[in-house]
Amino acid sequence: MQKYSLFSLIKNAFRNHKDWEVAWKNPKPKKEYDVVIIGGGGHGLATAYYLAKEHKIKNIAIIEKGWIGGGNVGRNTTIIRSNYMYDANARFNEFAMNLWRNMSQELNFNVMFSPRGIINLAHSDVQMNAFSRRGNSMRLNGIDAVLLDREEVKKLIPMADFSENVRFPIFGGLMQPSAGTARHDAVVWGYARQADSMGVDIIQHCEVNGFDIVNGKIKGIRTSKGNIKTKKVGLCVAGSTSILAEKLNMTLPIETHLLQACVSEPIKPILNYVVTFGAGHFYSSQSDKGEMVMGGDLDGYNSYAQRGNLPTLQHVLTEGLALFPFLSKLKMLRTWGGIMDMSMDGSPIIDKTHIEGLYLNCGWCYGGFKSTPASGWTFAYTIAKDAVHELNANLSLNRFSTGYLLDEKGLGTKTWIG
Amino acid sequence: MLFIKCPYCGDRSQNEFAYGGDATVKRPEINKEVSDKDWDNFVYLRKSPRGKHLEFWHHVSGCRQWFKIQRDTSTHEIFKTFKVTEEI
Amino acid sequence: MSQDYRLDNIGLINRDKKVSFKFNGKRYYGYEGDTLASALIANGVHLIGRSFKYHRPRGFFGSGVDEPYAKVQLYKNGESEPNVSATEIEIFEGLESESVNCWPSVNFDVGAINNFLNKFLPAGFYYKTFMWPKSFWYKIYEPFIRKAAGFGVVSVKHDKDRYEHKYEYCDLIVAGSGPAGLASAYAAAKNGAKVILAEDKPRFGGSLLTDEVNIGNQSGKDWANKIINELKGMQNVTVKNRAQVFGYYDHNMLVMSERLTDHLAKPKKYTPRQRLWYIRAKEVVISSGSIERPIVFGNNDTPGVVLASAAKEYLKVYGVLVGKKPLIFTNNDSAYETAIEFKKNGINPLIFDSREKPSSEIINEAKNLNIEIKFSHVVVSAKGYKKVKSAEVSKISKDKNTLGKIENVDCDCICVSGFWTPTIHLSSQSGNRTKFDKNIDSFVPNQPKQKETTVGSAKGTFTLEETLKTSFETGYQLSKKITNNDKKILTPSVVEKKFTKHDKFWCVPLPKGKKYKRFIDFQNDVTVSDIELALREGYRSIEHVKRYTTLGMATDQGKTSNLNGLQLVSSIEDKIVPDVGHTTFRPPYTPVTIGTIVGREIGKHSKPTRKSPMHTWHKENNAVFVDAGVWLRPRYYKKGNETLFQASKREAANVRKNVGICDVTTLGKIDIKGPDSAEFLNRVYTNAWLKLPIGKARYGVMLREDGMLMDDGTTTRISENHYHMTTTTAQAANILSHLEYYLQVVWPELNVNVVSTTEQWAGAALAGPRSRDLLKKIFTDLDVSNDNFPFMGYLEGNLSGVHARIFRISFSGELAYEINVESNNGNFMWEKIIQLGKEFEIQPYGTEALSTLRIEMGHVAGPELDGRTISYDVSLEGMLSKKKDFIGKRSLNKPAFIAKDRQKIVGLVPIDKKTSIPEGSHLVKDVNAKLPNPKLGHISSSCWSVEFNNPFSLAILKDGKNMIGQKLFAVSPLKNKVIPVEVVSSHYVDPKGERVRS
C-alpha cells in the first residue's frame, strides 16, 4: 500500500497525481468468507479492520447496501467524547478516545482528530449538581473533567448570551478538555483503505435479503449479489437493525428514529469548542471549513425517512439562538437527517445472540460516531473469540431482563424523547 | 410537519400532538400472571418496522384524547387514524 | 466613478432614484431596483471576492440564486451580516459592503499563493498530510486552516431585527412567477381556488422579463404585468414577491421565507425584516424554472466569465453591460438571444458555437444582424487574471475530442451557455424520485409522491407555447378538483422563436501540454482534475466524489456545478448519468436566515415563563427566583446583605421554630372523578387506595412500567367519586398524559375522568410548630384540633369570604398544612395569612429552605427520583403493596433490583461536622486507590441541618442497608475535595415522624 505523507504528496504532484492507487478496491463477492460484516459504516469497517489486524482473520467481507460511509458515520456532527456517568459507558468510550488519539498515524490517513474540548452548559444549580455527579464519576474513572463556573465559561465562549435578556442564564458547565471532533468521512475511508490492504473485501451496493440458519447456527447470507457462505456474521447496521432483525425473527429493544442536523454558511472562526446547551437539546461546534455544525432533538416519531421536518429544526435553532445570539443573522445552509437505532436505555448493545455465529452491534442512539474505534475493536474481539470482552461485557442484550440498565438520562423506554 | 386527522377534532398540524409509540404493544392484563419473557417483551421489545406502523398519538394541545395512526415510517404517509377502541 | 457600463434606455430600474452605496470603502452610484451586482457591474467593477481554496480572483457568474461567488459582508444601520449574495441583495441608500475571504484586500490577497501551490493541493490533500508530528494537527495545522477558511465575519451583537412567523392554508401554492407560474395561478384563481403565488425575486414574470416573446398580442413582459395586476386584485389570491418557497416538507407543508425590508434603507419600526410562512397547501404547483449551466473550459473562473442568461438579464432588467467586447460561447440556441440583445444595443458580440451546422430561426436572425458566428468552435481558455482580457479559441472536431489550432481573440467578457437544468429541488424534496431526461441531459420530476405538479422549464418544457398550455391546464384541473368549479380560461396565442437542438457537450478538452484549471464547482474550487483524481483513487460513488472533492457542498449547493460533475463522472466511469445518480436535494433551496426560522421566540421568550398568582408579592418582598422547569419560584427572600446560605438557613430555622409559608402553586394538580377512581388510583400508585375515606389524603408513589420511580405526591378524597391529586412540579404534564393513557388506552372500562387543575388553584404551605395556631386565626369557624383535623386530614373552609381547601400534609416534616384557593384569590389568601401570621413570627420561605427541611427529614425529591431508582433505593419499599397489582410491579423482581447489595438511600454526616459535602460527590472506601477508583454511591442532596447545625447529606449507596455506622470518604475531584463521612440513617430529624402528627 502506498504511504501517505507530505513527501508522497510532493512526489505525486510532479507526476500530476497520476500514480495514486485506489484507496479500496471494488471486488465481486467470493463464495465463502470466514466472517461477513453486514454494514459498511464506521463500526463495520472498524470491526473488519480490527479482525484483520488484531485477530489475523483475513478472509472477511463487508456487505454494504449503498456506499460505504453513507449512513450515520457520514451524517453526524463529528463529536468525540467520553463524558459518561456509568462506568461501562465511560470506560468503553475512554478506550475509544485512546484509539482516536493515534488514529491518523495508525491508519496513515488524517482523520483530523481535534481535541478542542467539549463544554456541557448548566443553567441551574440542580443541573450543576447533576454534572458534578457525572464529572466526578469521570475523574474517578481516570477521565479528564473540569467544572467551570459562569465566569470561566464566559472566558471560553464569550459570544454566548451572558446578558440580562436571557431565559435560562448560564450557571457554569462541565468540560472535558480532551474531547473534540474528527473528520467523519476520513474515518470511513481510513479504515476502509487499511482493511482493504489487509485483504478485506469491501462489497458495496449489495443488499442482504436473508440469512441461512440451520439448527440455530448461521451458515450464510443471501444477498442481491448472490449467496455467501460463512459461519460468522456481524450485524452492524445502526438504523437498519430492526429491518434485518425481522429477517432473523428477532425483536430487539430498539426503535429507529430520525435525528436532524444542519450547518450554517461558513464564517471566520468564532467558536473553538464543542458546546451543548443545558436547557434544551442544542449542541454546536464550528467545522474547519467555518460552518457552524448544529444538532439537537429527534423528530419524535419512528422514522426511516432520512429526511426531517422543519418544526424540529426550528425548535433546535430556537435553543441555539437562546445560547448564541450571533446565529440570528447567519444563514442555515444545509440540513440532513440520519436514522438512529435508539435503544431502550440509551446505551449500545455489543453481544452474541441466541443464534450461533450471529453477533449484534446496535443501539447506538445518536452517539455512535465517537465510539467507532472501540465498537470495532470490541466487536472484532467478540466475533473472533465468540466471547465478550471486559469492555463490552455490560453492553449486553440481556441487561433488559436482568435490570442492569445503563440509562444515562433516566428517561426510560420512551426512545422518541431521546 | 405532519398533518394528522384526530378522530375527534379533524385535521390538525403535528405540533398539537405528542407521539405515544408502538400501538401493537399490548400491556399484559392487570392482576394476571405473566411470564418474565412476556413482560420484558411488553416493556422493552419493539418491532420498529420500516413501512406500515401502528402507533399511538395524543392530542395534547387539543381534545387530550389518545388515538391510533397507521403511518408509513419511511414516507410518513398516514393511511388511517382510529379511535383507541377501533381496529384496523 | 461613473456608470460606464450602464445603457440609457433599457431596463426596469427606477432611473429617477439614484442610490449611493459603498463597496470596499469606495462610493458608487446605482439606481433603485439594482442589485449590488448590477450596480457594481454598471460601474465596471468585476472583482468581488476570492475563492475558497486557491484565493483566485472571482467576479460575478450569475444574476440570482445561482451565483457561486459573489458573497459580501453587508453593513446596514449599525448591523453587520456575513455572506450576503451580491446578485440577490437590492441596493439601498447607504448600503456598505466588503469583499470576504481575502487579506489584506481583494486586489492583493496573500492567500493567492495557494494558486501557485495548487499542484500540491489536489482534492483531499489534507487527508494525506498534516499527520506528523502527531500533536501538530490540532496545535498548528488546524488553526491555520480554520483561519484561512470561512467567508464573512459574524457579529456577536444581539440582532436588532425582528422576524415573524405566519401559518397559512390554501388550495394551491405556486412557487415561481414565470410564465408557468403565472398561467397556473391565473387559471386556478379564475376558477375560484385560494391561491398563493410566490416569487423569489423582486419582480414578477421570470423569463418573460428577458425573453423576446409575444403572448396574446402583447410582449411577454406586458402580459406578465397584466396577469400579476389582475391576480393582486383578486380576493382569493395572495401574491408575494421577495418570497422564496425553500422547503417542501411532509403532508404538503411548504415553507417560504419572505424578505420584507432587506431592500429598504430605513424600514419602519416593528416591520419584521423577514417572515417565515408555514403553508399547508392542498395542491402544489412547482414553476421554479431552470438554471443555465456552464460549459467547462480553462480558467473559466476568471472574472468576466458569466452565464449568457445572466448577461441578458443584466442588460434587459438593469440596463447594464457585463462587457463591451462580449464573446458568446454556447452549445445551444438560447445564448443567441444574449448576442442579439448586445447587438441591438450597439455592441458587437462574437459567437462561438460548439455545434457543427445548426440551423434555426434565431440563428438566422443573428446572421441577418451580421453577428459573427463560428460553428464547431470552442473557448479553450479565458485569459487575464482579475478580468477577462482575451480568450483562447479553437476549432473542435465532431467527436469533441480534438482541438485545432489555438487562436487568441480579444474580448472583455465570455458569456457561456451549456443549456438548461430544470430546478427540481422542491419536487425532489417532496419525495419525488426524479428521472433523467436524455433529450435535455438533465433530471426532471418523475411520479409525484405528494400533491405536487411541476410545470414549465422546471419540468424540462422549454417552449413557451407548451408551457402556457400545460400550465393553464394544470391550474384549471387542480382548482377544479378542489373547488368543483368549472371555469376555464382560454390559453392565449403565443409567438416565440423555435429553437433547434442543443449540443451534448459540456467540457472543453485541454489543449496538448496545457494544464489550465477547469472549474466545475466554482465556489469550492473543484476542478476537472480533482474529480478525475477522486475516481482514480476509488471514490466512485457520486456521494464519495462529492465528499472527497467537496463538489456541490458550497453555499450555492452546486446549482451550476452538480450536473457537470455528474457528466464528468459518468464519462470517466463509462456509465450513463442516471446510473451515477445525483446527490439528495434537501431544504433549504437557498440559505435561510436562522433568525427567520426562529421567529419571535428569542431572549427571554425562547421558552414560556410561568408565574404563580403571588409572583408580584414575592418580587416586592425581595424574592430571588429560581427556574423550576418553566416556572419561576422564590428560591429565598433576601434580607439585607444575606447570602443564599444565610437566608435559607434563617427561613428553615423559622419553620422549625415558628411557622413559615411557602408558595406551592407550581405543584401539578389533577382532578380525578368517576365511580372507578379508587380502583384507578389503586393501579396507578404502589400502595393501597380502595379504602381511603372521604376527607382524607394519602401519600402515593408511581412507577413506570420498567419499575423505576416516576413521581410522588398526595391524593385527597374530596367526595365519594372525586379525588384531588398532586404531582411534582416537573412531572405535572407527563403524569396527566400518563393517567390519560391508562384510562383511554389500557383500561377504558374504568369510568374515570382526569383533568389538570394546576392553574386553577393557588397553594400556600404553612409549616412549623405554630402553624395550627395560625390556622385557627385564619379559619375561625373551623375546628382544626388534632382530633378533628389529624395528619392527612382534609377540610374545606372559608378564608375571609373565600372558599378554601385545607390539606394537612407535610413535606417539611413539621406540623403543616396546605391551603388552596382559586387562583384569582391567591394573592388575597397569601397577604391575609402573612398579616394574621405576624404574631406567630411567620416568614416566607423559598425552595432552598424547603430543600433543607425535606433533606434532613429524609424525604426524597427530584435528585433521588432521577429515573434510575426503584422504591427500595429510596426506602419507599414499604409502600409497595403485596396484595394488589400496580403499574410497574411486574418489573420489580429483576435480579438487579433484588440484588443483596442493591443501592439504598442513607444519610451522611461529615466527621468534622463542619465541611459541607458538595452534591454530585461520590463515596469511596479508599481515597488513594488507583484509578479507576470503585464508586460506592453518590451524594444526591446536601443541606446544612438547621436542627443539628451541621452539614447533612443524602446519598444513594451500594448496600446502603448494611452500611449505617460505616466511615467512608465523600470525594469531589472536580472541587478537589475529600471529606471523611459517617453513614447514618436518612431520617436525620424526627425519625419517628412525630411532629407531623403532633
Image (cartoon, coloured by chain):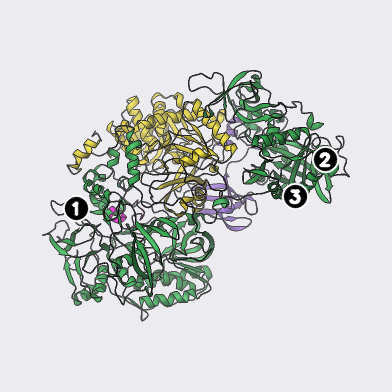
Chain colours: A yellow, B purple, C green
Give SS at disc 1: loop
Q: Nearer the viewer, residue A271 or C818?
A: A271
Q: CA distance from mark 2 to mark 3?
A: 20 Å
Q: Is residue C210 visible?
A: no
Q: Are marks 2 and 1 on the same chain?
A: yes
Q: CA distance from mark 2 to mark 1?
A: 94 Å
Image quadrant holding the N terminus of chain C, namely bottom left
Give the magenta range: C550-566
Q: Residues within 10 Å of mark 3 (few under 14, many from 20)?
A: many
Tag 1 residue:
C516
Pointers 1 and 3 in contact (C-beta within 8 Å)? no
Q: Give the residue furthest to the left.
A: C405
Nearer the observer: mark 2 or 1; the answer is 2
Which sits earlier in the primary sequence, circle 2 or circle 3? 3
Tag 3 residue:
C827
Tag 2 residue:
C839
Is residue A83 on the magenta stretch?
Answer: no
Q: Residues within 10 Å of mark 1 (few under 14, many from 20)?
A: some
Counting from the top left corner in percent of width and height, residue C370 is at 18, 75
